[in-house]
Image: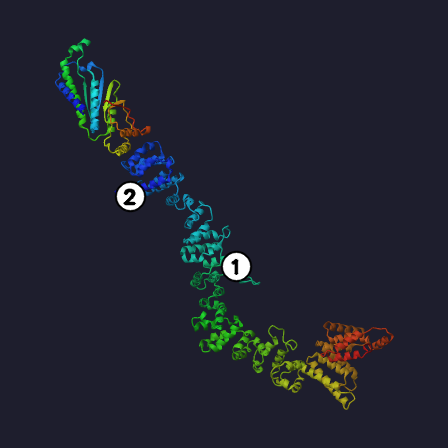
Amino acid sequence: MKTVQFLIAVLMIAGAGLSSSAWAQIDYCKLSDAKHEIHLFGETYSAKPDRSQMLRGLDKISKEFAMGDEVKIIVHGNGANKILKVCVPGCPDQGLLGNLLASECSAQVAKKDMVGFKKKYISSVKTALSSAGNEYDLFGHFRALEAYYQGRSTGETNVYVFNTTVPFGYDASNGASLDKIFVETVQANNQAGITLPKLSFVNPNQSKDLMNFWSDLELDGNSDGFKLDITKVVLD
Amino acid sequence: MLGYMSKKAFTYVTFLIALVLLSNPQDLNASAFQSYTDGRYDESFRQSYSKALQGDPIASQIIGMILIEGKGSAKSDTAAGKRFLISSIDSGRAESARYLAKLYEDGELLERNLGTALRYYRKAEELGASRLGGKILALAKKVEGRTSKAACRRYSKSDKKLATLIAQCIEKGFLDGNSARYWLVSFDEGEFSSLVKAAKTLLKVKSASFDPKKIVTRLPRFDEKASQKDKKGLERLVLQNGFSSKGCKAGKDAMGFEVKGDVDGCVLAAAAGDIKAISFAAPWWLNGEFGLTRNKAYAEALFKKIDSQPEGSFELDPRQILKGLESDPRRHFERAMKILDKDPLVYGKAVGEALKLEAQLIAQDRIQEFASGSADVLKVLMLADLNTLDPYVIASIIKKKNVDYINFVELSSASAIRNFNRIEFRKEWFLELLKLDQGTAKKLLTQYVDKSCGAIDFALDNPSLLAVAELNKSPLLSQCLSAGKEGESGSSFANDPVRAAAVLATKLNGPVGSQCEAFGEYLQNRSAFNDNFIGTLPAAVQNEEDNLLECEATDGSVAFYSAKRAFNEAERLKVGSFNSGKGRVAAFTRTFNLARRACDLGVGYGCGLAAFVVQNRPMKLTGVAGDENLQNIKQATARQLAQQGWSLSSIESGAYLLDLTQSAFASEGQKRDRKKLFDDMMKIGGPAIEIRKHAQCIEKDGALGDIVSGFASILGGGKNCSSECVAVRKILNIPELDIMSRDRGKKLLGRQACK
């Protein structure tokens, strides 16, 4: 709990710095080829523990960002998405680089931009989480991802998906709720035909019931079974 | 609706529980089933779904059921549900087939389709489900028809209620067996038209199944229950197969064995309305004869057919009908009257004979058994053929008519009198009547002798019952007497002297001299008549001498009787006594005259006697001139008379003619004629000719023979005629031996050969 509060505070400070940045700076994006894409499915985070896990994950991920990395945040919700694309601000080390770009980069501006960067980052998270508790279609989420990566390659991009993978309506206190969802899912055949690139789901709900649910949805390898080839990443 | 669905759901749950219990638990996804049965349909669904997709039959069944019924969270999806169920069925799940079948049958969750339901029920059974026979059969009947091949194969032949269908199935070739047998069972179970169908086979004469009795035994019930259309149908079959009244026979053959004829054919013909056959069959049914089970109602129904026929449109056999009703006198009488009403002329005789039954009851004072009132009794007395009755019954009826029922004026009617007058006289009933009422009997006998030879015979045999004078009034008397007694060649004093005497007495009745022919007969049988006649002697007998004098002039027999008596009297006159000569001559002359009169009146023996007297006894022959050779005239007269007697077939005269023609000096022609006469007489035989035969030995040849035989006896040679002499001696002991032969015999015994 304390960790979450702290993180939010840091992000707010950083956001404040970004807001005063001046864009006469060099193009940060030229400083790195690395790309990060973060999909936020805030609707699925109705449960507080899930939200905590989400933020932890985001924190961890953000620590991986390097100067000039392209960070694309896609906030999914209500069948649409908002995309924030920004490169991590920063000026290269002159001594080490000794190039023109370093001379053109204002460290002061970069700091401001960093603050702005953080604000946007946090804002996106807020936006995402603002839809938590809304009714959602989990398989719609998967299909949105599928649609998003239609024609896109993920080869050079670190993709992080924040989705609890908890179907809407799941009641952890009522095991039968998953049965109901199962029935509705397969009867609607929602689980079938979804094809996604290999993606990392960061800190999804790890309850056993849910795991079984997904397992059952695979339908023992039936062609109509759920075939989402994802990697569950736990960043704690 | 919700309530209804819940109820339906409950039904299916229950159904499934049964399935679980009935199925092999090792093959089941027990948990899924448990969830289902516990109402945790979503859980059950989730547990089963992937397996169902893999083709697991039980899981498929569960998913199919949930989808079709929309159990739990599942939306009703009959198409998907059916797919799962079909998959389950294809994988061998019988219960899925049963379930799906039921859905199609009920038509609530799936559109009702009995054909499909039937198909899945069959599939279920094929996959091993049990107790579906009845369901499949019921559906097969609805869908494919009650006699479809599939339905037929489901029928249990032992189920009598299915007999109609089984029979139809057999006829369609869907089942083996004899359809007629099942048609009969069907009939017995109340499907009355089935008898007509059974009859198609059972009445076909050339069919291996030909068995009309099976139809016959069911006719009464058929007649009672079947429709007019069916009855017409059976009638057509009976006629088509040739059953008719020709088969109707009853009674006994010449050897006394019962003759049945074709009972079944006759009964069938009756059922088809053949009135003549009904004449036989109705009584058979009524009495339970010839193997038929007694059935009064059916018999009555057959009788009604007769009653309903228009007059003249049928051939009725009243005798047969009424014979069959004899066990029920009241019905017998009623039916007899009905038949009579139809046509008295046609049926009167038969009915009259049949009323014998009622007549017997009258005789036995049991009239209440047939009659409703005195009118019925009177009808019987007026209509019955009384001659067919037993003697006692006739006698009793006559007595009742004349005594007991004397006050019923109907019995004085012309028809009643006519009927009683038809009674033919018979000794048997008359004797019974005598026992019952002698007065009536005597009165009747007086009437009957006027019209019945039998009565005359009886009266003659029983003279105490009827005065001869009464009998003589009968116009039939002469005719009957000449005809002789019934059943006999004719009464004579030899075989029936009492009757012969009685008959003769009737002939003798009348004033003296008026019955000479009968008197002649009397004289010939005088002794027997007097020994056997009962009653008052006729005047002719009482005044015999007067009558002799009256009749000897006109009647040959009487004349001959007098001639013999005169001859015997003449013979008794001693020769040489005072006036004996004239007296003998007169007596022999009278004998000759009487004998000759008898001869002229046709008594051949008289001719012989006259010839004998004229040849051998002294007499005065009238009409002979004095110059004539008297001896030659007598000889010629004797020959002529003997010849006349022989021509009248008198053996006595013929024999004497042989004596007259015997001569040692006869010509060859005379010898030949005599030999022929002898041979002819030998063919006739008798003591007269026997005497002449024996004479041949005793007398040898002519007059010399005596001398020769005398020498022979002395010399110890010649022919021994002792046996002939013995024979002659015996013949002379015969009282009836004629005078001429007796004289000849005596002479023979006096000859040397017999000494």
Return the chain for callout 1.
Answer: B
Question: Up-down: is B587 above or below A86?
Answer: below
Mark 2 is surrounded, within 10 Å at the Cα level, by few (under 14), some (14 to 19) or many (20 or more) other residues, namely few
Determine the image quadrant of residue B507. bottom right
Question: Up-down: is B629 above or below B18?
Answer: below
SS state under label 1: strand
State the count of labels: 2
The residue sitting at 87% across, 75% down in the picture is: B715
> For the residue marked with disc 1, what is the amino acid?
Gly
Of the numbered discs in the image, which one, if any, rests on residue B7?
Answer: 2
Percent position (x, y) of residue B635? 77, 81
On whether disc 1 and disc 2 are found on a single subunit, the reply is yes
Mark 1 is surrounded, within 10 Å at the Cα level, by few (under 14), some (14 to 19) or many (20 or more) other residues, namely some
Q: Residue reaching furthest front? A: A2
Q: Residue reaching furthest right? A: B715
Q: Is residue A155 visible?
A: yes
Percent position (x, y) of residue B266? 49, 58
Sequence-wise, the earlier of marks 1 and 2 is 2
Residue that badge 1 annotates: B261
Determine the image quadrant of residue B114. top left
User: Residue A75 vs residue B490: left or right?
Assistant: left
Q: Nearer the viewer, residue B693 or B66?
A: B66
Percent position (x, y) of residue B727? 77, 75
> For the residue marked with disc 2, what is the amino acid?
Lys
Question: The N terminus of chain A lies in which quarter of the figure?
Answer: top left
Q: Nearer the viewer, residue A225 or B705?
A: A225
